[in-house]
Amino acid sequence: MELLKRLSASGRRLLLGVVVTAFAVVASACDTNVGPQDYLSPEGPVARKADGLWDLTFGIAVAIFVIVEALLVYTIIRFRRRPGREAAQFHGNTKLEVILTLIPTLILAGLAVPTVKAIADLSDKPEGALNVTVTAKQFWWQYEYPDAGVVTANEMHVPTGQPVYLTLEGADVIHSFWIPKLTGKQDVVPGRKNNMYFVADRPGTYWGQCTEFCGLSHANMRLRVIAQEPADFEQWLAEQQEPAAGTVSGAAAQGQEIFMGTCVNCHAIGGTEARGTTGPDLTHFASRETFAGSMFRNTPDNLKRWIDNPPGVKPGAQMPDYGLSAQEIDAVVAFLQTLK
Ligand code: HEC
Ligand SMILES: [Cu+2]
C-alpha cells in the first residue's frame, strides 16, 4: 500500500493495465469452447503429425525456460554485489561461452531430425488418394474432382479415412490454403502447381481460410471441408455429377431468363448454355450451406442482399451490382433455389 501511494497517477494506471492484461491472458485458458480453427486439436493424421512436432518443441522449450530462469535467479542472488565485494564478472570466459553456444546448437540440430523426417513423410503422394484440384480466386475457392468431372466452390466434400490429394493452383494473386484441424498451410501461387494431402478421421465440418493477404476481402475468403462417411460421400458426388434440374416455372422461370441474359458471362450451370468460369460453378448451388467464400449462410435473405450489391456486402467482391429490381432479385433467387 505504501508503495502504491508513492506511485504517480500514470504509474498506477500502468500497473492496473499490466494486472488486468495478465489476468485476461490467464483467464483465457479457462475457455472450454475450443475454436473451430484450433491447430492444437487435430482431427486427422497429417495435422496430428504437425501437432506432435509442436508438443515436442514446446516441451523442450518449457524445460529450457525453467532451467535458464532458475540459473538466472540463482546467479543474480549468489554473485551480486555485497558490502566489501564487487559483483562477479564472467566476460571473456571462453569455456563458458563455448558451452553456451554448443548446447543450443545441439538442441536445434536434434529438433531438425524429426521435423525434416515429418516433412519428407508428408511430401509423397499417398496410395489410393482422392484427387481434388483447388483453384484460389479473389475471394473464393474452386474445387474440381477431375476423376468425377465435378466442379464446386467453397465447400469441399471428402470421404473420411481416405487421403485427399490436393493440387493447388492460383488464378490471380498469391493465396494460402489452410484447414487447421486437418493439415498445414500451403501457398497457392499463380503459374505453379503445389501439392499436399490430408485425411479426416471423422465425419464433420472443418473450417479453414486463406492465410496469405490477397486483397480487400482476404479475411472473407473462408472455406469449409465437409467430411462424410464414404457411402455418403459417394452419394454426394453422384448427385453433383447430375446436370442441373431441367424445366422451371413461375418466378423461377423469370429468374432463369435474367440469369441466362446477365449472369451467364461468369457462371456455369451444367446442362445449360451457362458456361462462364469467372465466378463459382452454380450447377448445384442450392446444395451448398454457405456461399461467397463461405462468408454467408445460403439463405434466401442473404442471397438477396448478395445479388443486390455484392461489393456492398463483401468488400472488393469481383461480382458487380447489376441494378436488378427487388422483384427481379426475388425471381433470380427463386431460380437459384431450384439448383439442388
Ligand atoms: C463479372 C462476373 C460475374 C457476373 C456477370 C455475375 N457474377 Fe456472380 N459471382 C462472381 C464472382 C467472382 C463470385 C465470387 C465472389 C466472392 O465470393 O468473392 C460470384 C458469386 C456468386 C454467387 C455465390 C456462389 C458461391 O457458391 O459462392 C452467386 C449465387 C452468384 N454469384 C449469382 C450471380 C447472379 C444471380 C448473377 C446475375 C445477376 C451473377 N452472379 C453475375 C462473378 C460474377
Ligand atoms: Cu486469398
Image: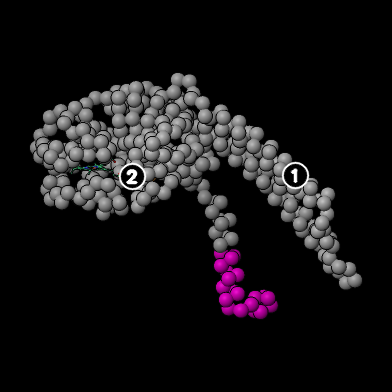
Res. 329 visible in picture: yes
The answer to which image quadrant residue 282 occupies is top left
What amino acid is at disc 2?
A: Gln
Residue depicted at 56% across the width and 33% down the height: 119
The answer to which image quadrant residue 142 occupies is top left
The local crowd at label 2, few if under 14, some if 14 to 19, many if 20 or more residues have their Cα within 10 Å, is many
77 horizontally vs 170: left or right: right
Whether label 2 lies within 8 Å of ligand 1 gets the answer yes
**Is 175 in front, or is 294?**
175
For label 2, the SS is loop
Q: Which residue is mark 2?
A: 138
Percent x, y of residue 30: 55, 51
42 horizontally vs 60: left or right: left
Q: Which residue is mark 1?
A: 103
Residue depicted at 61% across the width and 35% down the height: 115
Residue depicted at 22% across the width and 36% down the height: 276
Residue 9 is inside the magenta segment: yes
**What colouring method underlies this structural image?**
one colour
The local crowd at label 1, few if under 14, some if 14 to 19, many if 20 or more residues have their Cα within 10 Å, is few
Percent x, y of residue 245: 18, 29
The answer to which image quadrant residue 77 occupies is bottom right
336 horizontally vs 119: left or right: left
Q: Give the label on residue 124, or none.
A: none
Residue depicted at 36% across the width and 36% down the height: 135
Name the N-terminal-most of marks 2 and 1: 1
Q: Provide the residue span drawn in magenta.
A: 1-20
Res. 224 visible in picture: no
Per the model, the C-alpha gap separating discs 2 and 1 is: 47 Å
Percent x, y of residue 298: 28, 42
For label 1, the SS is helix
Above or below, comparing residue 239 to residue 95 in the picture: above
